Amino acid sequence: MYLLGLGVLLLALKYLEIGPVAAWEWWWVLSPFAAAVAWWAWADWSGYTKKKAMQKEDARKQARIDKSRESLGIKPKKR
């Protein structure tokens, strides 16, 4: 997401001809978009995206379990 933000910022600076970015070649300005595509391709290929989604789901599940135990008066398990 940071790469997309950087790409949009550089694109706006180049288009509006602001600062030193106005003199840069277009491929420098558009390179963060290519890096974002490469990152997403790697994240999907390696399973990084799925792993992060599963960790988030597990944390939500554990929070629900802890909340239920607390409402029953049972102390949550310490890790």
Image (cartoon, helix red, strand yellow):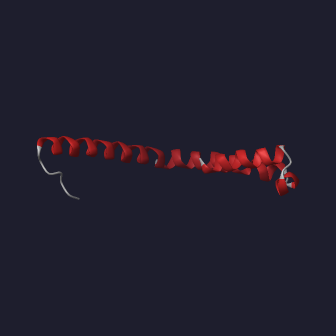
Residue displayed at 41% across by 47% down: 51
- Considering depth in this image, is 12 or 28 the residue closer to the camera? 12
Q: As drawn, is 24 to the left or to the right of 39?
A: right
Q: Position of residue 12 (x, y in %)?
A: 77, 44
Give the camera-side residue of 55 and 68. Answer: 68
Q: What residue is rendered at 17% in x and 45% in y?
A: 70
Corner quadrant of residue 69:
top left
Using residue 40 as the reference point, say whether residue 19 is left or right of it. Answer: right
The single residue placed furthest to the right in the displayed view is: 23
In this image, 52 relative to 60: left or right?
right
Residue 41 image point, x, y percent: 58, 45
* Quarter of the image with the C terminus in it: bottom left
Residue 59: x, y in percent? Answer: 32, 47
Residue located farthest toward the left when viewing the structure as drawn = 73
Q: x and y percent of residue 25 in the render?
A: 85, 52
Name the residue located 28 percent from the left edge and 42 percent from the top edge.
61
Q: Residue at x 71, y 44 (%)?
A: 8
